[in-house]
């Protein structure tokens, strides 16, 4: 059996809806809130799942292994997002977090799968029947994907709307979804590239940041983080972009406290030491996502609030 080629996932660029004049040149998909995964299906009934970083995460999702037989022996490499659905059928990253990182604990992964089933949303085909498809336009790759008829109890192919981007965005807002991914109809698949031919459009401004320090809380929050000091990669260094002091549940704050204690260091990881009284420093290895209103001219985040930890991302993914 010929080995399947390996790919890095293509990434979308944050932005806004394409101009109305070119609206009919774009396809719109619902933006999923989960863990990106490349799916390798050799055609022998097996399945291998790889995270955006390239890490093998197959063992963390035993409930997705049946996908290996769903293609009817057709060898393929697919791109998609693993999600955990809430009671209304929407992807919920907080539910999925308990599924992530269990590749080294198959028994625990199986138990957790019974309580929180995973669902794979497949949105692209990179290789099929011995032929690599990445140089084909989106429309042809989409047709090849739909030909596989991947609709099952734990996987699906998302609906696509061509044109009507403004209406699609309104629909996602009303449904409480995160937003849209706009994909240019004639675009090729660019492995490992953050391309302008894919645009992610969110209803709230968000940023992936690296935690470089924290400030202890007061009173009942003593010993727990009252605020996180966060930064973004800039010219090979970590640039401080602000202090985040809201957005956690008590459980999330306690979990973060444990992670911060393990990562404690004496030296500030930011390129310039922030003027923050009582700051404590950590190894810059925790990645989180924050919501914010706007940025200052210096690039600082205005009114940031914590959204979620991103255990699926490493600092090197934010370049």
Image: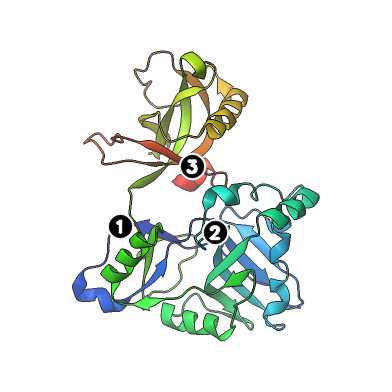
In this picture, is 301 found above or below 76? above
Which corner quadrant of the image does residue 301 belong to? top left
Q: Crowding at label 3, few (<14), some or many (≥20) Cα neighbours within 10 Å?
A: some
Residue 74 occupies which quadrant of the picture?
A: bottom right
User: Is residue 181 placed above or below 137 in the rendered structure?
Assistant: above
Q: CA distance from mark 2 to mark 1?
A: 30 Å
Q: Mark 2 and 1 residues: CB-CB less than 8 Å, in contact?
A: no
**Residue 107 at what x, y percent from top left?**
80, 51
Using the image, tell me which numbered label, if any, was put on residue 87.
Answer: 2
- Mark nearer the viewer, 2 or 1: 2
> From where the camera sits, is residue 137 visible?
no
Q: Position of residue 115 (x, y in %)?
A: 69, 54
Where does the image place residue 42, in percent across and percent down from the top left? 71, 74
Dot 1: what SS? Answer: loop
| Mark 2 or 3: the one toward you | 2
| In this view, 99 is above or below 28 | above
Q: Which image quarter: residue 252?
A: top right
Q: Which sits earlier in the primary sequence, circle 3 or circle 1? A: 1
**Which residue is tagged 1?**
15
Q: Which of disc 1 and disc 2 is earlier in sequence?
A: 1
Label 3 vs label 1, nearer the camera: 3
**Which residue is identified by label 3?**
308
Residue furthest out toward the front: 87
The image quadrant where one finds the N terminus is: bottom right
Q: Residue at x 43, y 36 (%)?
A: 247
Residue drawn 65% across the image and 55% down it: 116
């Amino acid at each position: 059996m010929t080995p399947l080629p390996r790919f890095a996932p293509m990434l979308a660029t944050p932005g806004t809806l394409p101009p109305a004049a070119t609206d009919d040149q774009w396809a719109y998909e619902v933006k999923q809130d989960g863990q990106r995964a490349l799916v390798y299906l050799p055609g022998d009934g097996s399945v291998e799942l790889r995270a955006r970083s390239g890490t093998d995460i197959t063992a963390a999702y035993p409930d997705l292994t049946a996908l290996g037989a769903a293609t009817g022996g057709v060898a393929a490499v697919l791109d998609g997002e693993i999600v955990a659905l809430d009671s209304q059928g929407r992807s919920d990253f907080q539910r999925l977090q308990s599924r992530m990182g269990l590749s080294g604990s198959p028994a625990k992964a199986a138990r957790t799968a019974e309580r929180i089933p995973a669902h794979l949303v497949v949105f692209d085909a990179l290789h099929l029947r011995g032929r690599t498809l990445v140089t084909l336009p989106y429309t042809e790759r989409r047709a090849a994907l739909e030909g596989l008829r991947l609709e099952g109890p734990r996987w699906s192919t998302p609906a696509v709307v061509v044109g009507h981007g403004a209406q699609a965005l309104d629909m996602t807002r009303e449904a409480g979804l995160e937003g849209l991914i706009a994909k240019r109809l004639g675009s090729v698949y660019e492995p490992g590239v953050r391309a302008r031919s894919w645009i992610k459009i969110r209803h709230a401004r968000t940023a992936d940041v690296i935690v470089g320090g924290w400030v202890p809380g007061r009173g009942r929050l003593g010993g727990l983080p009252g605020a996180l000091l966060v930064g973004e990669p800039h010219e090979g260094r970590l640039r401080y972009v602000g202090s985040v002091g809201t957005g956690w549940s008590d459980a999330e704050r306690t979990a973060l406290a444990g992670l911060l204690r393990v990562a404690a260091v004496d030296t500030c990881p930011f390129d310039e030491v922030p003027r923050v009284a009582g700051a404590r420093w950590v190894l810059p290895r925790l990645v989180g996502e924050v919501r914010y209103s706007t940025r200052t001219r210096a690039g600082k985040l205005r009114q940031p609030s914590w959204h979620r930890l991103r255990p699926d991302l490493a600092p090197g993914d934010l370049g």
